[in-house]
Image (tube, helix red, strand yellow):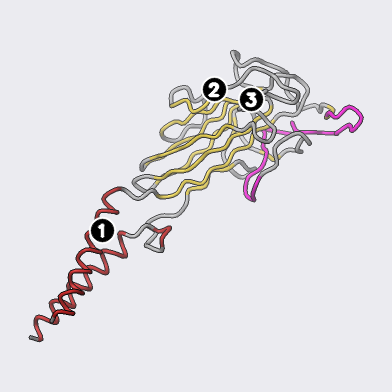
Amino acid sequence: MLSVVRSRTVCLGFLLAALIVSIPAQFGGVALAGTVDIFSGPSNGSNSVTGTNTGVAVSPSWAVPSGPGYEWISYGDTGCNTYVALTGRCTPGPENPMGTTVTSSPTAIFYQTFVITDALDSGILNVWADDTAGVWLDSGTVTSGTGTGGTELWAPNGNLGSNCANAPIGCISGMDAVIPLSLTTGTYTLVVDAYQLVGGSPFGVMYDAALTNTPEPASYLLLGLGLAGLGLLIRRRKLA
């Protein structure tokens, strides 16, 4: 009789362990890996002009970050140097770039490499730019080129509005590209091809994403089997 009780106790222990492992982290289970944050900031990534990303003086028309951790960046002092309230515009500085078109070379290209360690991570990438930008995702570590060797996530918009592109990707609130990402284990590089369409005006990009582990269907199957087995074991103990 004692061996039977011990066997049931061991089985109960295994079932509980299986349940704990199979419960997704967002429901109180075991987190197998942390969140992968991808965000624009002076300390993150690089660019094709100076190599070092820097924060810029924000234009009053630009979208404001909805949370901490990310900000508008550029390759130099290309933001709003002096805001003139009478005209509602920023005066250009020596580093504000000349104008170009979306069919020409980008004004600057921004790179950020990140690593996915989970089997599958998912989330939303938001990208703003003044005047506009194209977004690519490359495999591996990339520090040069326009990203065209990878997957195009968003094409640049060459149609101007009052401050920047008149539709995503633009610079004002609500004009960001909203890009869903689902990535498997590996190393990736986000590539943002930024275009300044009107010369002598503020230029910069901003982006943010938080990718979290997405449980595979097998995890839910294991959870269901564990619950069924636990229920059966409890029923037998009551009958005994």
Q: Secondary structure at mark 1?
A: helix
Of mark 1 and mark 2, the one earlier in the sequence is: 2
Using the rendered view, name the quadrant where residue 63 is placed: top right
Up/down of 222 relative to 231, above or below: above
Question: Range of the magenta residues?
Answer: 66-89
Using the rendered view, name the quadrant where residue 206 is placed: top right
Q: Nearer the viewer, mark 3 or mark 2?
A: 3
Rendering coords of residue 229 (x, y %): 19, 66
Q: Secondary structure at mark 2?
A: loop
* Residue 167 - label: 3
On the picture, is 82 further left or further right than 160?
A: right
Residue density around tag 1, few if under 14, some if 14–19, many if 20 or more, within 10 Å: some
Residue density around tag 3, few if under 14, some if 14–19, many if 20 or more, within 10 Å: some
Residue density around tag 2, few if under 14, some if 14–19, many if 20 or more, within 10 Å: some
Residue that protrudes farthest toward the front in the picture? 239
Taking the spot 75% from the left edge, 23% from the top edge, the residue there is 162
Using the rendered view, name the quadrant where residue 155 is placed: top right
Up/down of 4 relative to 206, above or below: below
Taking the spot 85% from the left edge, 29% from the top edge, the residue there is 88
- The residue beneath circle 2 is 155
The answer to if 37 sits in the magenta stretch is no
Query: Which sits in the foreground, 38 or 55?
Result: 38
Residues under numbered marks 1 and 2 in contact, where contact means CB atoms less than 8 Å apart = no
Of mark 3 and mark 1, the one earlier in the sequence is: 3
Q: Quadrant of the C terminus?
A: bottom left
- The residue beneath circle 1 is 224
Taking the spot 31% from the left edge, 62% from the top edge, the residue there is 21
At label 1, which amino acid type do we have?
Answer: Gly
